[in-house]
Image (tube, coloured by chain):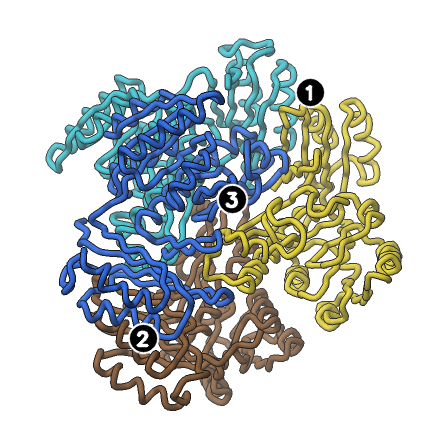
Chain colours: A yellow, B cyan, C blue, D brown
Amino acid sequence: MERTPTATLLLSCPDRKGLVAGVSDFLFRHSANIIHADQHTDQEEGLFLQRVEFELEGMDLGPEEIDSAFSPLADKFGMRWQLRFSSEPRRAAILVSREPHCLIDLLARWTMGELHMGIAAVVSNHSDHADVAKHFGAEYHYLPVTEETKSEQEKQLMRLLDDREVDLIILARYMQVLGAEVVDRFPHKIINIHHSFLPAFAGARPYHQAYERGVKVIGATAHYVSVEIDAGPIIDQDVIRVSHRDTVKDLAQKGRDLEKIVLARAVRLHLDDRILVYRNKTVVFD
Amino acid sequence: MERTPTATLLLSCPDRKGLVAGVSDFLFRHSANIIHADQHTDQEEGLFLQRVEFELEGMDLGPEEIDSAFSPLADKFGMRWQLRFSSEPRRAAILVSREPHCLIDLLARWTMGELHMGIAAVVSNHSDHADVAKHFGAEYHYLPVTEETKSEQEKQLMRLLDDREVDLIILARYMQVLGAEVVDRFPHKIINIHHSFLPAFAGARPYHQAYERGVKVIGATAHYVSVEIDAGPIIDQDVIRVSHRDTVKDLAQKGRDLEKIVLARAVRLHLDDRILVYRNKTVVFD
Amino acid sequence: MERTPTATLLLSCPDRKGLVAGVSDFLFRHSANIIHADQHTDQEEGLFLQRVEFELEGMDLGPEEIDSAFSPLADKFGMRWQLRFSSEPRRAAILVSREPHCLIDLLARWTMGELHMGIAAVVSNHSDHADVAKHFGAEYHYLPVTEETKSEQEKQLMRLLDDREVDLIILARYMQVLGAEVVDRFPHKIINIHHSFLPAFAGARPYHQAYERGVKVIGATAHYVSVEIDAGPIIDQDVIRVSHRDTVKDLAQKGRDLEKIVLARAVRLHLDDRILVYRNKTVVFD
Amino acid sequence: MERTPTATLLLSCPDRKGLVAGVSDFLFRHSANIIHADQHTDQEEGLFLQRVEFELEGMDLGPEEIDSAFSPLADKFGMRWQLRFSSEPRRAAILVSREPHCLIDLLARWTMGELHMGIAAVVSNHSDHADVAKHFGAEYHYLPVTEETKSEQEKQLMRLLDDREVDLIILARYMQVLGAEVVDRFPHKIINIHHSFLPAFAGARPYHQAYERGVKVIGATAHYVSVEIDAGPIIDQDVIRVSHRDTVKDLAQKGRDLEKIVLARAVRLHLDDRILVYRNKTVVFD
């Protein structure tokens, strides 16, 4: 299906009467056809958040003019805002370690048109996945890492991300902790899949922890990466029932299905500009 | 928690530019504070649907003036619309046959403040539940029915509903089919809980049907009652896993948990004016 | 439906060839008809666990003779075992604080025959639920508690439990921490419902914690009470999706549905002797 | 992890005292170590069903001797039974039409060791998936089909299945109806994934049907293929919530996640000999 070119406005500001009227009036005056609009008010914080997606065709403004036309209104209400165009898909880097299930799943979805992005590179600290990446038409970069070479490897990685103009990093079961420099450079632009129902079982070997504790449900959590490990804003979570019959290996196998689905959902929500972050939490306009 | 008095506007009309701007501008001009707004466009049908809830306090219109102030805008866009005030909760009748689980569940929720409604009457074709209804402070009416007396019983029922000014009928496992006269009188105002995942196993004895077919998941469906049985607009559904170990009796027991929850959710959505119906389907702004 | 009288054997012992043959041969020799049998081997621990339910009718042993007839076999394999008869239902005490939803739900299920137990007493540190308990035919005991009187109140409670010969305590949203004396006296005989997906959000105000963390799924956990708070063996868990739209109050309301269902499931599993505990985990033969 | 060689016995027969004792005694006498045992009695039918998996190492019978040693017992109880060895994995053919998501998912799982089988062939009525099949090391056969050539194509298919000694056919979104000849040849050996929650929306275009009916939950069903379309024994089902926001295309996309997972689960259950069929229903010993 052909997508007509659209723009998506994500904004947040102190709640005030007239906000919805202001934004919708702006779009109406410029003959924009609204495809989707959703909003949320955090009553406690007095914060208003909104997503509006509209068609560019038929507007009396060119895409490059919208920004300056909207600015006065945004200033008036003290908005933090972002405007993106469907014609400029993100350039993603997928990072992966030994286990390929999330990588293959993302590549297959991408091939089927589920993910509106370019894949600038697949990067791994293992050489194993070069063939599958190539098969699906993605560049593969093998950047091995040891404790000694970690800092050097991250520099290589940063150069690669810069060269390829990457603006989204997907950690598809990448088992290395990214340094603060990388994390700070890509705020709310690194999506990780953690194989537990956070905040339960943060850190290493969550399936072993879950097995030890004897839980009856396991989960997976997709979140933006922040400097504190496994503590960034949660984008999506899902769970599956387990029982005493499940060994750690069984938990890992069942969990892989969750990991694939939850990561893919989070990536799609991000690509469609459906996520706003505030106070280390996400508002997801799905 | 004290609820501040609000009004909720539910509207639908042919999709057109300027709709959102028109409604939000109207509310802004009259100094209404929007608490919640959600909208949906059915692209195929070219139909726009919206829910807006706003506080009455601070408006420059009294509640009784909003209607006529809004009418010109509604006419301009050809809207079908409804305006309701939180200060005028619905008056519900709960109908029940032998099994009391949904009835008790609704009464308990009502006692705890989960359901913003008055209970005008509990009506049953059995005398069994008089005590529990009274315990929770609801009037009980025993209207027995046989094949011969069905038409007479429905007349009694209609009189009762009229006398009590009932505007919502909840079929909490009421095993009699309501006649067309009652159904037509309360369009989209009768909520039934069917103990299957409709459209599978419509009609009688759905748990027996599910057992026979050997399904691995059973469900429950809350829907508005229409003249065609089990074919009205679906409000909510939920499911639970079952296995070969479950007898028909086990399915019924597991299913009761679904029935209670799905019915209560549907009733709450209706009471909060979150449901719009078109083409035998619901739009649920939750 | 009439239940034929059955006995249920729960056993665990070091895994060894011939165990299943030994137990089934014993039952066959005494002409027992097996209704349900399930078993589990923890390979790592080398531990075998089994549940066998069999009809008493037709056996060549009277109920009171089974114990001594089985002992030699049990000794040979070093079994820890328990034999219970369906004709001797447990005597439960339900403890509750301010919120009545779990209490009412349990009473309603009990009335409908879902829970095979006697209710020896409903106990609360509030006087609020006397009427509803009486309505469903249960004794009500109001045992108020303050920081100063806590130790005295627990003594009263213990006396009450002793007098009523209680052998199952259900904490149906009882917000007091039970002292070690009570806990030690009823090992794996106190079932608590915790309103979070343990081990996430252990301790106080889990819905506030969940709200703060911005999770997308909330849960409830039924577990046996041990001296360490919220750390006992987990019996059952379930979850429900939430979003940024849900306030703390909404989380609490959605969570109540989980609490009711998960607690009732755990109680039923316990009453049917389907739970074995080892290493602070449960094996649930459902 | 190395799997020790095991054998799995699946049996069913009229229920009778002494069955469990008989089977477990047989295994004990021949020094078999039971890894997993599960059983079920359909009380209404008076039918007993059992699965026993045991290690071959340490037995006093060679694998080829078990059959004849067990026969007298099987005859005595009138058992239908099957014995399979983990050392002889099944040889599967995967059939696929245009949409590759199930195919790629199965291939990726197979590569990761999740599916204990050989892939004898990937067969399609489209040429599209030759590369991906080859990438994962599977033979690809392009067997185009039109209404006129259908009978001829099925003959080719049958020859191919015979040549490759296929004993499991996986319909991974194969959109052709298999003829009775193929179906009869592989009883309970053809697994299909239907993209609805059967029996709802059997037949063509289930997502369109679901959209029209306005359901709030969609599902997927894995089942054995029988001559009557979409009516064979159900192996597994799962569901996902949808809303008025979901177009038919969205339903299809959400549904693909279900299809992949439910099909893979069903295949794994079959490969592990965990499924017994009777009266068009499955008993799944998971």
| Residue C202 picture location, percent across and down | 55, 39
- Residue B278 position by quadrant: top left
> What residue is disc 3 on?
C231
Give the secondary structure at mark 1: loop
The amino acid pointed to by label 3 is Ala
Q: Please say if C162 is above or below C70.
A: above
Mark 3: few/some/many CA within 10 Å (<14, 14-19, 20+): some
Give the secondary structure at mark 3: loop
- Residue C29 position by quadrant: bottom left
Residue B279 visible in image: no
The amino acid pointed to by label 2 is Ser
Q: Is residue B47 left or right of residue D24?
A: right
Of D204 and C55, which appears nearest the observer?
A: C55
> What residue is disc 2 on?
D24
Q: Are marks 3 and 2 in contact (CB under 8 Å)?
A: no
The amino acid pointed to by label 1 is Arg
Disc 3 versus disc 2: distance between alpha carbons?
Answer: 38 Å
| Residue D82 picture location, percent across and down | 35, 80
| Residue D258 picture location, percent across and down | 51, 58
